[in-house]
């Protein structure tokens, strides 16, 4: 299923575009670039009316992202932009002394993200036109790996298949080419909290654990539109 889903999504986006081929201003594009992500969150522990919450963050992990998109104008200034992207998220080791740390761990989470964005175009004289994008996305997990001291382990069973969040971006078109920077604010819990509850809360009947981990990061991309 995970191998078939990306092909299905690409076919769906192409079908939408060809069904709207009468609209002369509809454009397609390709893009790719680098991503810089962290995982962070909080661990809450409660016991007999007492509770404490510890927050934590990983170091920044550099990865790759790339994809296809379609831009459908609403008017001169606004467009709707659906996309299908492969992107690497996760986090890298850090020197943190927090309760939950990443002192010897590098986590790589590979997703197919499907954003739906509103694009605000800012027309200027000349060949350069800035733009702003904002919207949300759904992500589907392809692969999850953690590296501990040189040993790589598959942790896909511990990570949720579906993720979601918000995207905010700024960029500029240079004719058919463009460059864009984005911020991804993850809203979903990355790891399987049901699995965590079964493993921890089952061992400590009088103690309740609540574990939440989210992706967040920046990306920069260059691309071309047709």
Image (cartoon, rainbow, N blue to C red):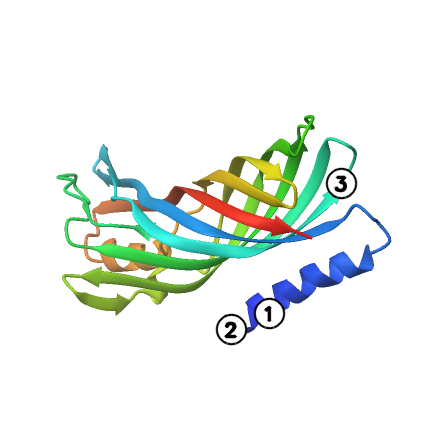
Q: Residue furthest front?
A: 126
Task: Name the residue carrying label 3.
Answer: 73
Q: Which residue is mark 1?
A: 7
Q: Find residue 16 and report its horizontal and vertical position in percent.
A: 75, 58
Q: Residue at x 33, y 59 (%)?
A: 195
How far is the residue under mark 2 from the one under mark 1? 8 Å
Q: Report x, y in % for residue 132.
A: 59, 32
Residue 153 placement (x, y as % from top left): 25, 68
Outermost residue toward the right? 22
Horizontal side of residue 19 vs 193, given as left or right: right
Location of residue 111 in the rendering, given as x and y in whole percent from the top left corner: 46, 58
Could you tell me how many numbered marks the image carries?
Answer: 3
Mark 2, secondary structure of its residue: loop
Residue at 31% across, 65% down: 155
Q: Nearer the viewer, mark 1 or mark 3?
A: 3
Q: Quadrant of residue 133?
A: top right
Instruction: Please give the name of the residue rendered at 51% of the width and 73% of the height, measured from the top-left corner.
Output: 3
Q: Which mark is residue 3?
A: 2
Mark 3 or mark 2, earlier in chain: 2
Q: CA distance from mark 3 to mark 2?
A: 32 Å
């Amino acid at each position: 299923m995970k191998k078939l889903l990306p092909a299905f999504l690409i076919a769906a986006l192409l079908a939408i575009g060809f069904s709207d081929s009468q609209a002369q201003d509809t454009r397609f594009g390709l893009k790719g670039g680098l991503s810089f992500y962290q995982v962070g969150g909080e661990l809450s522990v409660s016991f007999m009316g007492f509770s404490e919450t510890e927050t934590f963050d990983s170091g920044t992990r550099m990865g790759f992202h790339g994809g296809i998109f379609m831009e459908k104008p609403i008017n001169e200034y606004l467009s709707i932009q659906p996309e299908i992207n492969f992107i690497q998220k996760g986090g890298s080791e850090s020197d943190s002394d927090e309760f939950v740390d990443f002192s010897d761990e590098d986590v790589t989470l590979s997703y197919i993200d499907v954003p739906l964005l509103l694009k605000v175009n800012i027309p200027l004289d000349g060949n350069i036109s800035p733009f702003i994008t904002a919207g949300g996305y759904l992500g589907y997990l392809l692969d999850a790996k953690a590296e501990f001291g040189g040993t790589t382990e598959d942790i896909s069973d511990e990570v949720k298949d579906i993720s979601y969040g918000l995207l905010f971006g700024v960029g500029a078109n240079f004719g058919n080419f463009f460059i864009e920077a984005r911020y991804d604010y993850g809203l979903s819990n990355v790891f399987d909290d049901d699995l965590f509850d079964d493993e921890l809360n089952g061992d400590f009947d009088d103690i309740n654990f609540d574990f939440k981990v989210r992706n967040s990061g920046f990306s920069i991309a260059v691309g071309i539109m047709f």
